[in-house]
Amino acid sequence: MSAFNPKYRGPLLLCLLGFLTFGAWGAGPVIGQPVKVEPALRWKEPTKLVLFDVARAGARLVVVGEMGVILLSDDDGKSFRQARSVPADGTLDAVSFVDDKHGWAVGHLGLILATADGGETWTQQRVDTAVDQPLFSVVFRDVNEGWAVGLWSLVLHTTDGGKNWETLKVDPAPGAKKADKNLYHIFLDHTGALYVAAEQGNVLRSKDGGQTWTYLHTGYAGSFWSGVVARDGSILVGGLRGNLYRSTDDGANWSAVPTGTQLSITRLNEVDEEIVGVGLDGLVIRGKARDAQFLAKQIGDRDTLTSMAVAGSGRWVMTSKSGIVVLGKGGRS
């Protein structure tokens, strides 16, 4: 089946206005009548759907996006096919693998899916159809312990591979009455500490597996949508209007890194010895972790880029609101 189903128009527009603009959510989680979750549809041209994240599962590339679509590529991004079995049609915002078999995808309706066969088949581990509190990011330390974060300070934790998820308490930011920050991207450093890129210039850190959190003061007031820890230990977070901030002391102090652009950064990755970011209007930024400034350019038709991964051949495979975008080895256009 490939025809557009009107039932998805509302969630799709919410996704585009909320996730792609990162901050247009309303006053809280959407509460209403339970939504029926159905298996993901098969699409005639799935690589042209709105896609949000790509991850490596060994040599395989796994992509997730709107309406539960999950795509697999075993030829370095030259071709993609849909996963054999996806039990839910909710929009998927992020995907993460710990090895070539075990991975998790998260998204709207608090949806969490898991795979143990490299993305061929998926099982549903969590969903809340009465409250649409989307999950934006997921990370696992190993096949057992992982975390997912989302709307309004939602943090989930598992120690059994996702069979059970508990909600972790997040205290309000200093001066705030409640914990209500949108948590956009969670990532680990080399010591196992957790970091979360969040809105209003917030970066959260936990050194005890998410049981307690510290708000780190970056000096910025806008949203951070992604973060990465470089091999040298530098922490970089990026987001609204091309803002990129760096810490070289585990988040104690931060400084702005000029990027030469006001286009928003949606994802940061470490590629070989560089930090690479992608973003709105075809934005690609790159530089060494401790460079004084990063270089920015716009590629292709200047589509909204949402994530990127490097295939085994060195080709850059990116997701966008118009589907898959592929660059040559080293990011050559």
Image (cartoon, helix red, strand yellow):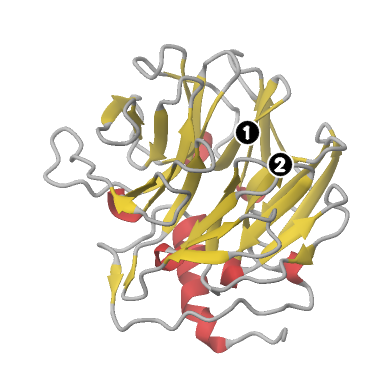
Q: Residue at x 61, y 76 (%)?
A: 40
In depth, the one of 295 and 120 nearer the eye is: 120
> Relative to 63, is 287 above or below?
above
| Mark 2, other Cα within 10 Å: few <14 / some 14–19 / many ≥20 | many
* Quarter of the rendering containing residue 290: top right
| Mark 1, other Cα within 10 Å: few <14 / some 14–19 / many ≥20 | many
The residue identified by callout 2 is 309
Q: Is residue 109 left or right of residue 122?
A: left
Q: Position of residue 223 (x, y in %)?
A: 40, 41
Q: Residue at x 55, y 87 (%)?
A: 6
Q: CA distance from mark 1 to mark 2?
A: 8 Å
- Numbered label attached to residue 269: 1
Q: How many numbered discs sit on the rendered protein?
A: 2
Q: Position of residue 308 (x, y in %)?
A: 68, 43
The answer to whether residue 303 of the structure is visible from this angle is no
Q: Residue at x 16, y 32 (%)?
A: 174
Q: Position of residue 121 (x, y in %)?
A: 66, 65
In depth, the one of 266 and 148 nearer the eye is: 148
The answer to whether residue 301 of the structure is visible from this angle is yes
Q: What's under tag 2, amino acid-wise?
A: Ala
Q: What's under tag 1, amino acid-wise?
A: Asn
Circle nearer the N terminus (1, 2): 1
Q: Residue at x 74, y 42 (%)?
A: 58
> Relative to 107, is 77 above or below?
above
Quadrant the N terminus occupies: bottom right
- Numbered label attached to residue 141: none
Task: Check disc 1 and report its element: helix, strand or loop.
Answer: strand
Task: Check disc 2 and report its element: helix, strand or loop.
Answer: strand
Q: Is residue 256 left or right of residue 280?
A: left
